[in-house]
Amino acid sequence: MLNFTTAEITAWVGSLLWPFLRIGAMLLAAPLYGAGTVTTRVRIAFAFILAIVVAPLLPTPPAVEPLSLAGLVISAQQVLIGVSIGFVLQMVFSALTQAGEAIALSMGLGFASMVDPQSGVQVPVVSSYFVIMSTLMFLALNGHVALIELTLLSFQALPVGVEGISREGLWALVGWASTMFVYALLVALPAVAAMLLVNLSMGVITSAAPQLNIFAVGFPMMILLGFILLLLTLPVLLPQFTELLASGIDMMGQLTRQ
């Protein structure tokens, strides 16, 4: 007959539960894994499998009962770490979504919206285009593998314990949020600036020929030129997204670095 002590059962449950919470929180907060098209059962099963694989390789967890006050604090810290890692990647994708919203408004397509499969909210069609492109580039760059690898390596840099992300790490995350707006501006600036020149040209044409119906001529031309600009700026999208993704991965490393 097998006999297990309470300490052994507590250590076994803790060694599996806390990695599961950190990995599960990351999968819930990160794009692609946390999309509405991925069911909760799939995320739970995937997080559980990863926790089983990584548990024997982790440092010995603290001998704390999971249902005690200290155990609840440790659980909350693991959830916070996982959510922070996934949130950084969420901001990477949000930068392109914001760029798409700015371009759509300048094109006159701000009213045309559809449901974003990542977030489940209504976004302009141009933003949906950028979300699809960013997802394809993310997969092509093996970002989904790098995200899982970084999460698993975080257990070495930031072991399971009462202490979680430091105050400096949280402030660094808040400061890095400005990078999202910077890259959103860089992506949208060429198209928005070109559409501004188109609007100025339409204003000059309207002043020179008042009988011309600007609503019948201007809007279709702006939409057509907007699509042409999206096609012309497509080659520079990959380098910009690569730089933003590299900056996000570096930020994830700073979060888990003591």
Image: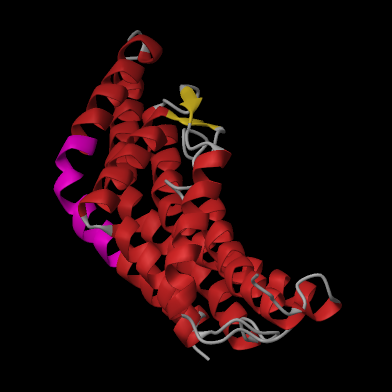
Residue 185 in percent (x, y) is at 39, 56
Left-right relation of 129 to 32: left
**Residue 104 visible at all:** yes
Q: Nearer the viewer, residue 211 or 198?
A: 198
Left-right relation of 49 to 14: left
Q: Quadrant of the N terminus?
A: bottom right
The answer to which image quadrant residue 13 occupies is: bottom right
Q: Residue at x 46, y 30 (%)?
A: 124
Residue 165's place in the image compared with 236, above or below, is below
Q: Nearer the viewer, residue 42 or 31?
A: 42
Residue 18 in percent (x, y) is at 62, 70
Residue 107's place in the image compared with 81, above or below, is above
Q: Residue at x 38, y 76 (%)?
A: 250
Residue 51 in percent (x, y) is at 50, 64
Count numbered badges in the picture: 0
The answer to which image quadrant residue 83 occupies is: bottom right
Left-right relation of 40 to 162: left
Q: Nearer the viewer, residue 195 or 174?
A: 174
Q: Residue at x 57, y 66 (%)?
A: 22
Q: Residue furthest right?
A: 69
Per the rendered image, the range of residues in magenta is 230-243
Residue 125 in percent (x, y) is at 40, 28
**Residue 34 visible at all:** no
Q: Nearer the viewer, residue 7 or 243?
A: 7
